[in-house]
Amino acid sequence: MNAVQLPLEGMPRRLYSCTPSRLNAWLDCRRRYRFTYLDRPAPSKGPAWAHNSVGASVHNALAGWWREPYERRTPLTAAILVTNGWITEGFRDAEQSGRWLERARDLVSGYVATLDPSDDPVGVERTVATRTKVIAVSGRIDRLDRRGDELVVVDYKTGRRPLTQDDARSSLALAVYAVAASTMMRTPCRTVELHHLPTGEIVEWRHTEESLARHLGRAEDLATEAAAADERYREVVAAPPSGGRPSGAAPARSRTAPGGDGAAGGRSGTTTRGAAAEGGRSWAAAGGEWPSAPVERQSVGPAAVPAEIDELFAPNPGPICSWCDFRRHCAEGQAAAPERRPWDALAE
């Protein structure tokens, strides 16, 4: 007979492994958190959002621009990178996609014209990580600069909503990235910047050690709550059969609410960047032609859970429900906000 191993009193709990997007999902809507991170196979999402396609195309082009040789870091190269990597998902038609391609080309080429091409960043699309006694958190920074003896976290924004200093100050993700970058590089990192390409505005916030510690403490509090809920979910909900997702079911794709380039209240780390790998379609991949209609895939519903779990992961209905990936699976969200078309967040 095999002995059952019991937990030892006082033994430390396993670190909660997460990203800021996961923590923000828990904060924003626990049902969306469950659908995204716990139900397997994950429930089917709705169609892609056009504003995500714009944001992902811009981010990809800016990352690619810094990877070019110095002599090719020009506004023209930036525009070409946008064209070659243009993601066509979510637009009403080819005409709308073409107009937004031109806008994105102008945004990116105009932005890089303000940069010094010889001032190489410390990192581009750089993954950073840190841990405390509670969490092991990681994420990807759009750009990490060195300014004098310090590092600066730079986050690109393409949403139509103008940004304020509060957006930079209150961002859990940016604060966590600053802590993680400082830890990994052994260099102070207290300044975070939001670069809003539609207006050309740069919104900056300089953290103190105390404010960074408060953000990290907030992340630990959210992680503690989420970890306990995760554990209860695993205890109550039976594991799915081997094989996971049913054949033909689509992999999860990220959609984000307008005004922010990532999960509601989070960063842009989970947009449709690298769309080819996530089921997206780029203009270049389509040979410069409008892609054919996507193939209908098997729809997957939420996992069947008892009332206790449904209550533990209760929804948080509100206006943001218009933009939720999982709206089709949530009656409360449908009642709370009207349905939106995939291109409705574009500033037409």
Image (cartoon, rainbow, N blue to C red):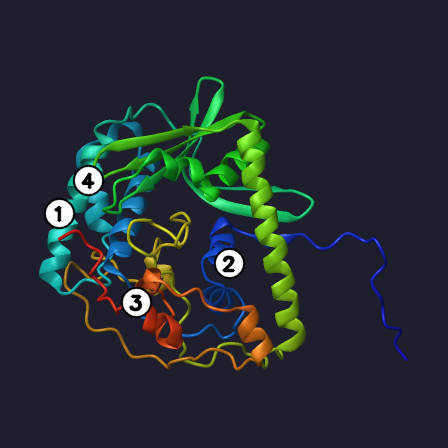
Crowding around mark 3 (Cα neighbors within 10 Å: few <14, some 14 to 19, many 20+) is some
Crowding around mark 1 (Cα neighbors within 10 Å: few <14, some 14 to 19, many 20+) is few
Badges 3 and 2: C-beta atoms under 8 Å apart?
no
Q: CA distance from mark 4 to mark 1?
A: 9 Å
Left or right, 76 with respect to 241, comes to left
Name the amino acid, label 3.
Ala
Name the amino acid, label 1.
Glu
Q: Specify the label residue 118 is tagged with.
A: none
Of pointers 3 and 2, the one earlier in the residue sequence:
2
Which is more toward the observer, 174 or 40? Answer: 174
Left or right, 230 with respect to 142, comes to right
Residue under circle 2? 26
Which of discs 3 and 4 lies nearer the camera? The answer is 3
Q: Position of residue 5 (x, y in %)?
A: 85, 68
Of pointers 1 and 2, the one earlier in the residue sequence:
2
Q: Quadrant of the N terminus?
A: bottom right
Q: Position of residue 6 (x, y in %)?
A: 85, 66
Q: CA distance from mark 1 to mark 3?
A: 32 Å
Badges 3 and 4: C-beta atoms under 8 Å apart?
no
Residue at point 49% right, 77% down?
245
Q: Is residue 202 above or below residue 9?
A: above
Residue under circle 3? 337
Q: Secondary structure at mark 2?
A: helix
Q: Specify the label residue 102 is tagged with.
A: 1
Which of discs 1 and 3 lies nearer the camera? The answer is 3
Q: Secondary structure at mark 1?
A: helix
Of pointers 2 and 4, the one earlier in the residue sequence:
2
